[in-house]
């Protein structure tokens, strides 16, 4: 049996995008990849993210937000930042971890002040589906230069 790739999705608050990425990876690529998620800060798990993932049969309700310091001991193969803030503040990871950056819009930020829940859900669903498309291309999608913003053809 081949050892699974260990991949960390790193975001600012580990409440939405990185949690969805972890859930999708476990669902779609769990046979090849051991996914983790963490944040450079920690916020509460986003209930709308949990809801839109449940709509497509992926349960992330038992996942919990973690600070990146909680996973520093894991020998990651890849650290994928999913927002600019995490990319700029991503700490050094010991070992062979290769950094990659794939930007996804921030649903909580984009939906601030929106009173209409259905309009908010449209944003969450779009980002959920973009993350799914990226995860479905793993691990091949990680083969791009570290200073590149994202692999071609993902979005």
Image (spheres, rainbow, N blue to C red):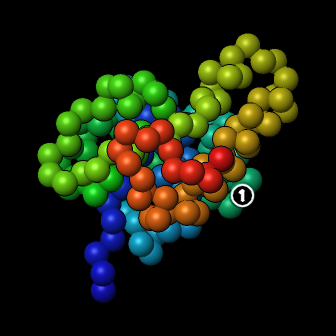
Asked whether residue 42 is in view, the answer is no
Tell me the residue at 25%/45% (across/down): 71
Q: Position of residue 122 (x, y in %)?
A: 80, 37
Could you say which quadrant of the image residue 96 lies in?
bottom left
Image-based side of 99 in relation to 122, left or right: left
The foreground one among 23 and 45 is 23
- The reply to whether residue 2 is visible in this rendering is yes
Residue 86: x %, y % from top left:
39, 30
Q: Which residue is mark 1?
A: 56
- Residue at image position (74%, 34%) is 123
Image coordinates for residue 77, horizontal then vertical, percent: 28, 57
Which quarter of the rendered picture does the N terminus lie within? Answer: bottom left
Residue 69, relative to residue 114: is it above or below? below
Relative side of 11 to 6, left or right = right
User: Image check: 102 left or right of 123?
Assistant: left
Return the residue nearer the eye: 85 or 140: 140
Task: Give me the residue at 20% from left, 42% from top.
Answer: 93
107 or 151: nearer the viewer: 151
Tell me residue 130's x, y (percent).
66, 47
Q: How many marks?
A: 1
* 145 with respect to 82 (left or right): left
Looking at the image, residue 73 lies above or below residue 117: below
Check the image and name the residue furthest to the top. Answer: 113
Dot 1, crowdedness within 10 Å: few (<14), some or many (≥20)? few
Residue at 42% x, 24% y: name it: 85
Which residue occupies the extreme left position in the image? 94
Local SS, label 1: loop
């Amino acid at each position: 049996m081949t050892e699974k790739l260990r991949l960390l999705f790193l975001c600012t608050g580990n409440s939405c995008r990185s949690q969805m990425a972890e859930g999708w990876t476990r669902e779609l690529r769990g046979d090849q990849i051991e996914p983790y998620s963490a944040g450079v800060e920690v916020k509460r798990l986003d209930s709308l993210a949990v809801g839109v993932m449940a709509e497509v049969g992926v349960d992330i309700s038992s996942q919990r937000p973690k600070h990146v310091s909680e996973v520093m001991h894991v020998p990651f193969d890849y650290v994928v930042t999913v927002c600019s803030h995490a990319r700029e503040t991503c700490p050094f990871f010991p070992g062979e971890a290769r950094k990659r950056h794939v930007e996804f819009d921030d649903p909580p930020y984009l939906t601030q002040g929106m009173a209409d829940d259905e309009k908010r859900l449209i944003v969450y669903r779009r980002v959920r589906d973009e993350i799914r498309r990226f995860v479905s291309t793993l691990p091949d999608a990680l083969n791009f230069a570290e200073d590149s913003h994202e692999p071609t053809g993902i979005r």
